[in-house]
Amino acid sequence: MSNENKTAKAETVSTVRVVREYAEALGVALVLAFIFKAFAIEAYMIPTGSMASTLMGRHKDVNCEVCGYPFQVGSSREVDENGYAGSEQPSVVSGTCPQCNFTMYLGEDNTANRNYMSYNGDRIFVNKYLFDFRKPKRWHVTVFRYPANPYINYIKRLVGVENETLRICHGDIFVKKDSENDFKIQRKPLRALKAMLRPVNDNDYVYVPALKLGYPANWYSGSDDTNSIWTTEDDKSFGTKPAADTQTRWLKYRNVHPSADEWSELLNNQLPNTADLDKPMLVTDFLAYDSELLVSGSWLPPMRSAKIEKDGKSTALQLPPQNARSMGQNWVGDLALSCSLTVQETKGKITLRLTKGGQAFHCEIDPAAGQAEFSIPDVPEFPVFSVPTPINAAGQYEVMFCNIDEQLRLVVNGSEIDLQGRGDYDALCLPESKLSRERKPTAADLEPAAVGVSGGAVVRLEHLKIQRDAYYVSCKDATEDAQCDLIHSPYMRSDLFPPSENGYRKFLMSPERWVEFGKTRVSEFKLGKGQYLMLGDNSLQSKDGRSWTVDGIPFYVEQKFLIGEAVSVYWGHGWRIPGTRLALIPNFPKMRWID
């Protein structure tokens, strides 16, 4: 037999073997799928954005054209309840970046010639028989049958368990057991907390050309520090020079970003001439997923044009108006500050500071002693205490300091430091206290985070991030605004309604106008035996127990309707095959455990 025939025969055998192996693997996968479905695990697809951004419904994956930040824009309303995108369905034409506030045009005729296709929601595995062995748990993502139609499955986070009264107040969850007299705040386990944190600022994605024109940076050494020891080479990371004195030198965060009008000028290489240029705003419950602008038919909103220079290329951009109602109407003071902290010398101290309601909260790290000291300045009722930490030598550490759910927390290199309950301060949140839950934001909340060094500490900060906690709006029926928690909403004032971006921005910049903050609605839900309350992580777009009573449906889910707990995302959405709209290439980063 010739060598050519031998080669051809070998190739044929190899092809047959590959086909057989794929067929066998597919057969095994199908058998396992049927076994799992019958006995333990079942697959579901997330249709809507009620759990965004923990779990994605139908959405568009977007990288900001200006700063490059990756985010998602919801598009579930592009299809009807049967998943059909007919001619009557609206289309999503814009979304706003949570990092830089740039609103992108996502229409098919965009001048950047990008395909912003919509992807179906996450596909997940659900453990169906877990509740045969234990009770459902608070904060676990749960699949259940919709009480009004048991043939429809819903997925939410379980926040209320049987035999308790649950209260939603100031975005947080409080619970009173039937045998108790007082409500107690409910805190999230670390894994659930991380899943529910939402981006406010990620300094890895700062748009440097705007800073070069003179636009204010988010992180800056405060105006009270005339001899700043903080330095930066790229405006994304920061270092310190040695200083012999004991003064704490602060690097402060302010929540400032351009408006749509300002972006139009910045991208045309002009510094906006406005009195509000350097004014920061309050942190709100804005979520990029909800910032979509929907249009029907051929109508498009009025747009401006600009050009952006990247990698030596000039790209034309269309600038659509921002969906003003999506900016976030509720102040969020529960924040997390994280960074990569490089300790270059084990001397001096590093202080992480978060501010809520005008009150500072400190975590002071002493690398020489390997200790972290926690305090609430000017609140003597909170005892100052210290705990050991792994930050006890020169090196790089991943650090996250949280002031969330009336509790201070510190996470180092992914592990939470055990504060033995001493970081809890809910007992001090009485009406007459400086920590009253009813307190409103002050001008200090316009700079809600900072990092300080003293005593000659030499450090480097990279990957600075500010995140906020999920915020549950306290709405209970159709007569209440599902977007705003304030009893007398200032957003309904004549100068803000109909809503406009500039009106909202000016309000959020002006402390003298915040008299209504702190005065929020309170909703309560009494749960009996075998009754559970489900809420969506995307509070603003979740059809859940807070609103079911409008349709005459009980606000609770009976235990008989519980299906199981979500385990993992086995298929977020695939990458598109080049030249097609088929998203079939596995997208491994989106495959993950669900917390």
Image (tube, rainbow, N blue to C red):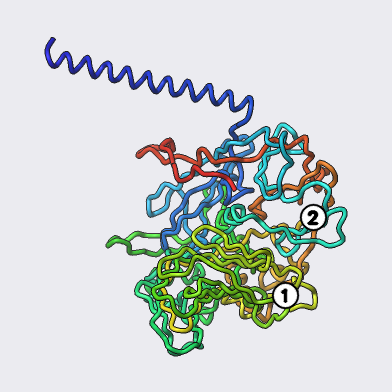
Q: Position of residue 11 (x, y in %)?
A: 24, 19
For badge 2, the amino acid type reads Leu
Dot 1 lies on which element?
loop
Foreground residue among 142 and 539: 142
Image: 545 above or below 131: below
Residue at 12%, 12% (x, y): give it: 2
| Marked residue nearer the N-terminal end (1 or 2) | 2
Residue to which mark 2 is pinned? 166
Image: 208 above or below 553: below
Q: Position of residue 64 (x, y in %)?
A: 44, 58
Q: Is residue 195 left or right of residue 341?
A: right
Do labels 1 and 2 touch, CB within 8 Å? no
Residue at 62%, 70% (x, y): give it: 504
Q: Residues within 10 Å of mark 1 (few under 14, many from 20)?
A: many
- The CA distance from mark 1 to mark 2 is 22 Å
Q: Is residue 276 left or right of residue 380?
A: left
Q: Residues within 10 Å of mark 2 (few under 14, many from 20)?
A: many
Image: 557 above or below 399: above
Residue 524 lies in quadrant: bottom right
Residue to which mark 1 is pinned? 435
Residue 9 lies in quadrant: top left
- Residue 281 appears in the picture as rendered: no
Foreground residue among 37 and 395: 395
Disc number for residue 13: none
Residue at 36%, 20% (x, y): give it: 19
Q: Quadrant of the N terminus?
A: top left
